[in-house]
């Protein structure tokens, strides 16, 4: 396909406009797509590009929050995502694989290394590996398929480009004080491991958002995106994106 083309993209309304638009912009940047203009709103996006259709399809195939794309009246639906998510569904993980893919994409990491300090059954590391990203899984308990302890990680300082994780909440740590202490210790543990310009994308219960952001600010981490994940009833979790300054 020669010349500039316009793509109309439908986005999933799962966690608000900000996360879906940020994910799309990050994937466009990672792909090297020559996009002159990207517009994005609630449930939609419009991309003008002089790059080829195959390159554009590569972007939407990896996106967690893209529903479909229309170019010259032809509809395209993501296909790669089904293969990626299918590789982990058999474990019935607590973290939705779609959310795990979204969180990985939001870091903007290309090849890693990426670490999940609370890996559990390994949903995040497995999906990262499917994307060609070198990943490390840890947890707070000793598990046969994990390589380190979440709060005592034997990893070289400044060597990790992204941290993507879904820390435990009330089912394991039943009091808010114990839980907030766990999240604070987690941030203090990973800040030294994270490379300059690196990202942390994590989930957390809504009642800990202020505590975690205050701790992140004290560690010179910047919040660049926040989205809400409604779990059930009154229970909500946030997806929080943090970055470490290059300075």
Image (cartoon, grey):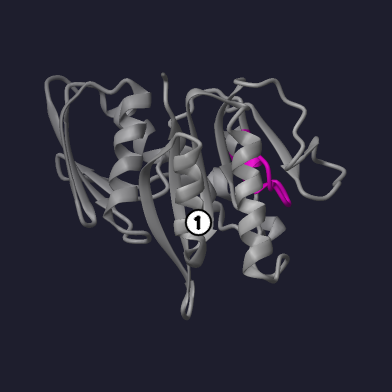
- Measured from the top left, where is residue 170 in percent x and y? 65, 69
Would residue 25 be visible to someone looking at this image? yes
Image position of 153 (left or right of 4)? right
Q: Which residue is drawn at 31% across and 39% down?
A: 24
Per the image, the residue denoted by label 1 is 211
Say left or right for 124 vs 21. Answer: right
Q: Where is residue 55 in the image (x, y as percent from the top left)?
A: 33, 26
Within the image, what quadrant is residue 21 found in? top left
- Within the magenta stretch, is there residue 119? yes
Image position of 83 with respect to 239: above or below: above
Could you say which is closer to the camera, residue 195 or residue 34? 195
User: Residue 28 location in percent, x, y?
Assistant: 31, 30
In the rendered structure, which segment of residues is drawn in magenta? 115-127
* Residue 6, picture quadrant: top left
Residue at 45% of width from left, 50% of height from top? 213
> Is residue 24 on the magenta stretch?
no
């Amino acid at each position: 396909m020669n010349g500039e083309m316009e793509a109309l993209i439908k986005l999933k309304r799962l966690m608000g406009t900000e996360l879906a638009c940020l994910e799309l912009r990050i994937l466009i940047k990672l792909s090297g797509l020559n996009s002159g203009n990207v517009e994005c709103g609630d449930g939609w996006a419009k991309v003008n590009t002089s790059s080829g259709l195959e390159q554009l399809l590569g972007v939407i195939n990896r996106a967690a929050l893209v529903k479909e794309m229309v170019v010259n009246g032809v509809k395209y639906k993501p296909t790669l995502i089904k293969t990626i998510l299918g590789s982990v569904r058999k474990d019935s993980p607590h973290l939705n694989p779609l959310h795990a893919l979204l969180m990985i994409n939001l870091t903007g990491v290309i090849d890693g290394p990426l670490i999940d300090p609370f890996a559990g059954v390994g949903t995040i590391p497995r999906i990262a590996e499917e994307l060609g990203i070198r990943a490390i899984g840890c947890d707070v308990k000793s598990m046969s398929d994990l390589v380190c302890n979440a709060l005592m990680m034997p990893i070289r300082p400044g060597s990790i480009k992204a941290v993507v994780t879904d820390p435990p909440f009330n089912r394991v740590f039943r009091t808010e004080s114990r839980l907030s202490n766990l999240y604070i210790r987690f941030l203090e543990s990973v800040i030294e491991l994270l490379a300059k310009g690196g990202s942390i994308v994590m989930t957390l219960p809504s009642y800990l958002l202020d505590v975690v952001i205050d701790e992140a600010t004290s560690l010179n981490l910047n919040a660049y995106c926040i989205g809400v994940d409604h779990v059930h009833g009154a229970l909500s979790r946030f997806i929080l994106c943090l970055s470490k300054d290059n300075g």
